[in-house]
Image: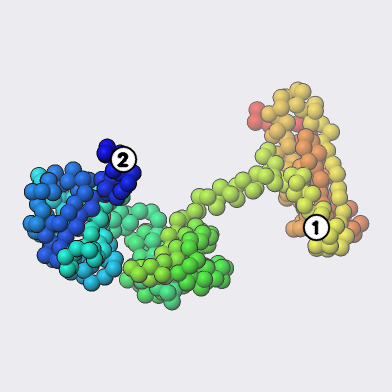
């Protein structure tokens, strides 16, 4: 009978041989009873050479007590807990393995089956390869604020970025409610997220401002990770990233979307929204629209160039800003066209404003080369 035919009748042997992880069977004294081919190849020894001998010496001396205690406890359970140990190969080099064992009822009393998964590759991809001191140093040096909150919402631990970003001493920050660090307008939203942390809410992200020691708000993006059900953490992890530049960029984009680049005046989109609000009754009941253009702009562009025309438009916009009242809206529609939206229909008020506009636009505009041109 060929090997293939035997495997077809009883595939267990070929399956054990093909397993990617070493599998060994030990008795209650840590003597080797059996090992699969992967274990022999990984550790460089032959099963026949070690069968019946204790392999406890292969564990790192610092891990030996843990290894023997785990072996004893596994014999009393159906499936043991995961244990991380350093195991030596035939050259004496140690590698980290994650080991889980289970009883082997068919073997001698106390026998266990152990599956060993090597952690070398996984640790190579970890940030600090399991070095907790290095991990702590990296977190402390990172610009992101890291906070560990208890279930009640008090700060149990914090990275040194709290001091760098918020100028808050760690000894004062730890122990106080996290909401004390949140700016008043954002506390309700943040409290709702924290109250929902019950071990099942996962990860939530929101924007909220944290305050410095002097009370100044700093816009942050908060990532709240609910680890209340984690046996190690039993709390909530908050990562806070300063987004001051992002908030400023957003404000700039919003301003540009609603304002004319040349004059800085609101554009037609702002006027449209204001007209809708006036129509829907948001604000004073009666409004007045004033339209105007610059008769001399084409001549200025033709004689002095479009850069001169831009100077004139910017100066006209500034003069209009100076004469309108608070609540009046000055808009550049485009070209030489301007619109004023006034929250009144009082003829006296409108007439007075028109006279101020004429007076403001009457003086000539001086160009960069000293030439004076008439804008109106």
The answer to which image quadrant residue 230 occupies is bottom left
Q: In the orientation shown, which residue stands out farthest toward the bottom?
A: 152
Give the quadrant of the C terminus.
top right
Q: Residue at x 78, y 34 (%)?
A: 335
**Label 2 secondary element:** helix
**Label 1 secondary element:** helix
Residue 78 x, y percent position in the rendering: 29, 68
Number of marks drawn: 2
Pointer 1 or 2: first along the chain: 2
For mark 2, what is the residue? 5
The answer, for residue 237, to whether it is visible in the render is yes
In the displayed structure image, the side of residue 41 where residue 240 appears, left or right: right
In the displayed structure image, the side of residue 59 where residue 215 appears, left or right: right
Q: Residue at x 50, y 50 (%)?
A: 245
Dot 1: few (<14), some (14–19), or many (≥20) neighbours within 10 Å? few
The answer to which image quadrant residue 169 occupies is bottom left
Q: In the orientation shown, which residue stands out farthest toward the top?
A: 303
Q: Residue at x 19, y 51 (%)?
A: 35
The answer, for residue 370, to whether it is visible in the render is no
Relative to 258, is 149 above or below? below
Q: In the orientation shown, which residue stands out farthest toward the right?
A: 347
Relative to 361, is 324 above or below? below
In the depicted view, which residue is nearer to us: 130 or 13?
13
For mark 1, what is the residue? 277
Residue 75 x, y percent position in the rendering: 21, 68
């Amino acid at each position: 009978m060929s090997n293939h035919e035997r495997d077809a009748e009883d595939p267990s042997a070929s399956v054990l041989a093909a397993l990617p992880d070493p599998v060994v069977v030990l008795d209650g004294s840590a003597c080797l009873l059996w090992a699969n081919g992967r274990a022999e190849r990984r550790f460089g020894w032959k099963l026949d050479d070690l069968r019946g001998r204790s392999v406890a010496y292969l564990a790192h001396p610092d891990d030996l007590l843990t290894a023997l205690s785990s072996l004893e406890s596994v014999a009393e359970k159906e499936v043991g807990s995961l244990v991380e140990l350093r195991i030596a190969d035939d050259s004496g080099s140690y590698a980290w393995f994650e080991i889980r064992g289970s009883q082997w009822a068919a073997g001698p009393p106390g026998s266990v089956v152990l599956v060993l998964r090597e952690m070398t590759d996984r640790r190579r991809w970890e940030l600090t390869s399991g070095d907790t001191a290095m991990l702590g140093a990296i977190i402390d040096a990172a610009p992101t604020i890291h906070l560990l909150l208890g279930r009640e919402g008090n700060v149990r631990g914090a990275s040194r970025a709290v001091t760098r970003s918020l100028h808050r001493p760690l000894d004062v920050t730890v122990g106080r409610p996290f909401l004390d660090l949140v700016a008043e307008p954002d506390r309700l939203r943040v409290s709702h997220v924290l109250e929902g942390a019950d071990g099942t809410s996962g990860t939530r992200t929101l924007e909220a401002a944290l305050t410095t020691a002097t009370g100044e708000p700093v816009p942050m993006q908060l990532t709240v990770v609910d680890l209340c059900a984690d046996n190690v953490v039993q709390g909530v992890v908050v990562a806070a990233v300063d987004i001051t530049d992002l908030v400023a960029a957003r404000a700039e984009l919003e301003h540009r979307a609603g304002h004319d680049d040349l004059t800085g005046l609101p554009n037609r989109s702002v006027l449209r929204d204001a007209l809708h609000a006036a129509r829907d009754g948001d604000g004073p009941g009666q409004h007045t629209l004033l339209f105007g253009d610059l008769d001399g702009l084409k001549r200025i562009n033709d004689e002095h160039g479009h850069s001169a025309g831009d100077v004139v438009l910017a100066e006209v916009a500034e003069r209009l800003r100076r004469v309108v009242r608070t609540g009046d809206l000055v808009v550049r529609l485009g070209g030489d066209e301007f619109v004023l939206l006034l929250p009144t229909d009082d003829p006296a008020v409108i007439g007075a404003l028109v006279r101020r506009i004429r007076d403001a636009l009457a003086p000539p505009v001086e160009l960069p080369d000293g030439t004076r041109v008439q804008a109106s």
